Image (cartoon, helix red, strand yellow):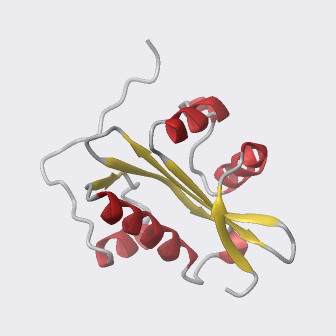
Amino acid sequence: MSSIKLRNYKSDDYQSVLKLWKITNLGGEERGDNAETIETSLLHGGKFWILEDSKTRKLIGSCWVTNDSRRLYLHHVGIHPEYQLHGYGKFLTETALAHAKSLNMQIKLEVHHSNKTALNIYKKLGFNILEGYEVMIKRRH
């Protein structure tokens, strides 16, 4: 991890973030994840971390936390496929958990049931499935 550095998101990262999300099948503009939404979430207590390979200047990971003043929500923990299985996803998740602990806030996430790797990481880090709940969304009004 010597060349991999954690830093805060900057607005000029947006296009690289979109590329990462596309190849990792995470968020995107069609889901309402756009530059304005990111900036607004940061203004309202959110955090967005970037993992960058300092040798290549390549963005290799992202982790976005939003804050609704009641709880935090963990979004789009994603690692570029070339860098997966080296503990970077766990590292980003632990960064988000440390932030939640510093604020004394609970943290919630959604993960696709087929993403066994992520499910295992989250369970090992203390996340529990909310039995009896279904996730619902209305994207268009």
The reply to whether residue 33 is in sight is no
Residue lying at the far top in this picture: please name it. Answer: 141
Q: Choose between 70 and 85: the one closer to the eye.
A: 70
Residue 32 lies, with reference to residue 75, above or below; the image says: above
Across and down, in percent, residue 39 comes to 60, 36
Residue lying at the far left in this picture: please name it. Answer: 132
Across and down, in percent, residue 135 comes to 29, 40
Residue at coordinates 52% horizontally, 69% vertically from top-left?
92
128 relative position to 119: left or right = left
The reply to whether residue 1 is in sight is yes
Identify the image quadrant of residue 61.
Answer: bottom right
Q: Choose between 118 and 73: the one closer to the eye.
A: 73
Q: Quadrant of the N terminus?
A: bottom right
Residue at coordinates 39% horizontally, 69% vertically from top-left?
98
Residue at coordinates 43% horizontally, 12% vertically from top-left?
141
49 relative position to 127: left or right = right
Residue 84 lies, with reference to residue 46, above or below; the image says: below
Across and down, in percent, residue 78 comes to 58, 61
Across and down, in percent, residue 70 comes to 25, 42
